């Protein structure tokens, strides 16, 4: 669907993209992550040919591709109502079908049909976002790009937008969800791309990411004092390595093929035998936020859970 290779973009002396590689397959809900100002919007604008790239390749799965784009905080015409605005969008897009019929369809999809007689200036931020999504959907795009669609919305508004994305995904849409709200991505995306330092710091399936960064077959121990848990637990032969986490927790990783329940049992019984009482012992489960922060800070790499003892 979309294949980007070595994309570079600068504004004067300031370089935003430094050789970005990105791949979106048909049917993906691609969560494009990164901090504010990292270049996500620049990437989307280059894909849509709103601004020119400096160097690099952007290839689509077919020559004649339709892209629907919702920019961050879309500027709509407040004096129009929803029907008028979408009819206008259809005319601008030179839609070949029945414009009024398509206007009704996209307003139904986004849940705005019953409010479409109201002037847009009376809409809430969430309603504006839904009308913006309707506009992006008007030409039945092959690729739908949503730039921060839930930014600055209250929880109810965010839930409404995410429900629309889930329904679009179920219908087979290919979507790039460009955001810094990690919980939204974790809810809907099947693939993740993390932009950091102008390059793709990580790209892959969400499920594979969690396996790669050590969320399975690992147990974390929080010591009560400065006792060296690594030494206390050194006799457990099923431990492959351990990692000192930020804050002082120590995570122990089982050797390949060893169930985490067995590792948990061995750690707890060994601590009891040596009369060492920790503050807590738990199975390690990294959230997307923890993985993201680790990648963007340089703490984690794709080999994070494959190295040697680092404690």
Image (cartoon, rainbow, N blue to C red):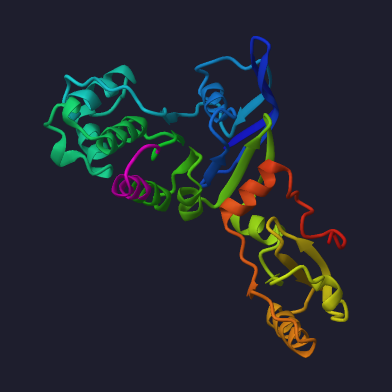
Magenta residues, start to end: 151-162
Find residue 63 and report its horizontal and vertical position in percent.
55, 26
Q: Nearer the viewer, residue 238 or 244?
A: 244
Q: Residue at x 61, y 60 (%)?
A: 286
Coordinates of residue 310 in the picture (x, y in percent): 84, 59
Q: Is 39 placed above or below 272 here?
A: above
Examine the structure image and report whether residue 153 is included in the region drawn in magenta: yes
Instruction: Please tell me which residue is depicted at 62% across the width and 28% down the height of the picture.
Output: 59
- The answer to whether 42 is drawn above or below residue 310 in the figure is above
Task: Classify residue 268 by image quadrant.
Answer: bottom right
Residue placed furthest toward the top = 12
Q: Is residue 7 above or below residue 106?
A: above
Q: Quadrant of the C terminus?
A: bottom right
Position of residue 17 in the picture relative to residue 150 (left or right): right
Would you say the magenta stretch is mainly helix, strand or loop? helix
Q: Position of residue 283 (x, y in %)?
A: 64, 73
167 or 20: nearer the eye?
Answer: 20
Where does residue 67 sit, x and y in percent of width and height? 45, 29
Does residue 79 belong to the magenta stretch?
A: no
Q: Residue at coordinates 77% horizontally, 69% vertically from top-left?
A: 253
Q: Is residue 150 left or right of residue 87?
A: right
């Amino acid at each position: 669907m979309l294949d980007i290779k070595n994309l570079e973009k600068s504004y004067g002396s300031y370089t935003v993209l430094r050789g970005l590689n990105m791949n979106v397959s048909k049917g993906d809900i691609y969560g494009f992550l990164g901090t504010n100002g990292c270049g996500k919007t620049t990437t989307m604008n280059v894909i849509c040919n709103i601004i020119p790239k400096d160097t690099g390749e952007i290839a689509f799965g077919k020559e004649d591709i339709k892209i629907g784009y919702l920019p961050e905080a879309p500027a709509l015409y407040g004096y129009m109502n929803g029907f008028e605005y979408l009819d206008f969008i259809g005319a601008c897009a030179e839609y070949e079908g029945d414009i009024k019929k398509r206007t009704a369809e996209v307003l139904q999809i986004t849940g705005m049909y019953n409010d479409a007689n109201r002037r847009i200036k009376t809409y809430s931020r969430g309603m504006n976002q839904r009308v913006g999504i309707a506009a992006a959907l008007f030409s039945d795009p092959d690729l739908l790009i949503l730039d921060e669609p839930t930014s600055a919305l209250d929880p109810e508004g965010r839930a409404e937008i995410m429900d629309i994305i889930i329904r679009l995904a179920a219908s087979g849409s290919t979507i790039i969800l460009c955001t810094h709200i990690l919980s939204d991505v974790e809810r809907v995306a099947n693939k993740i791309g993390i932009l950091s330092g102008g390059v793709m710091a990580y790209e892959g399936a969400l499920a594979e990411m969690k396996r790669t960064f050590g969320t399975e077959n690992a147990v974390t121990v929080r010591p009560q004092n400065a006792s060296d848990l690594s030494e206390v637990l050194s006799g457990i032969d099923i431990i492959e390595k351990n990692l000192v986490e930020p804050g002082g927790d120590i995570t122990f990783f089982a050797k390949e093929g060893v169930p985490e329940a067995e590792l948990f049992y061995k750690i707890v019984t060994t601590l009891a035998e040596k009369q060492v009482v920790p503050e807590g012992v738990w199975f390690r489960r990294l959230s997307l936020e923890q993985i993201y922060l680790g990648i963007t800070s340089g703490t984690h790499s794709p080999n994070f859970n494959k190295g040697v003892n680092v404690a």
